[in-house]
Amino acid sequence: MATGDLQHAILVATRAYQGRTDRQGEPYVAHAIRVMLDVEGDDARSVAILHDVLEWGSISLRELLAEHFPQRIVEAVEAMTARDDEPLEGFLERVRRSELAVAVKIADLRDNALPWRLDAMPDAATRERLLAQYRRSAELLGTSLDEICGRAVA
């Protein structure tokens, strides 16, 4: 059974992602749910469902803080939020400083690299650009996208 923090995170994420869609045109919350189901433990699941609320959702850090989540959850969500004009290396360095963020980022990469999601990209150039970014992100986390996915990624 989910803890109060996880239940609260699911409610906050559902509100934050309301009406938002991903690059494939699917409801954004579906991606967050798949990532949540791919990690272990209620803290990691809370971070997973919230991992994109600041970047792709409709809430601010101030609003997230007002929800009174434990500091470890807010810090991991904030670590996973890419900042404007931030190099990938800086972003992943911040992720690496949080064990929760690393676990969720690996699950996020695995979901982003699902064949059906890659095939649904709007064009080949976008697909290749994002795939290169996912590969580099995996390397910066000390692994490979193939290892994360358990298969060769085209």
Image (spheres, rainbow, N blue to C red):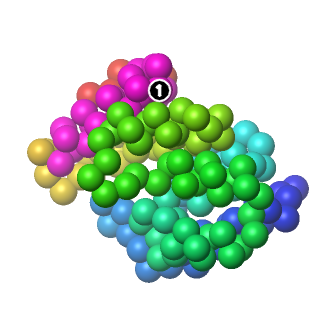
Along the horizontal axis of the image, is 152 left or right of 80?
A: left
Residue 143 locus on image (x, y percent): 46, 20
Among the 4 quarters of the image, the one containing residue 112 = top left
Along the horizontal axis of the image, is 136 left or right of 103?
A: left
Residue 65 locus on image (x, y percent): 66, 69
Q: Residue at x 31, y 57 (%)?
A: 84
SS at circle 1: loop
Closest to the observer: 141 or 21?
141
Range of residues picked out in magenta: 126-149
In the picture, which quadrant includes the N terminus? Answer: bottom right
Mark 1 lies on residue: 141
Is residue 136 found inside the magenta-colored segment of the image?
A: yes
Residue 40 visible, this orientation: yes
Residue 14 visible, this orientation: no
Can you say whether 14 is above or below 107 in the image?
Answer: below
Mainly helix, strand or loop, the magenta region? helix
Q: Residue at x 62, y 38 (%)?
A: 98
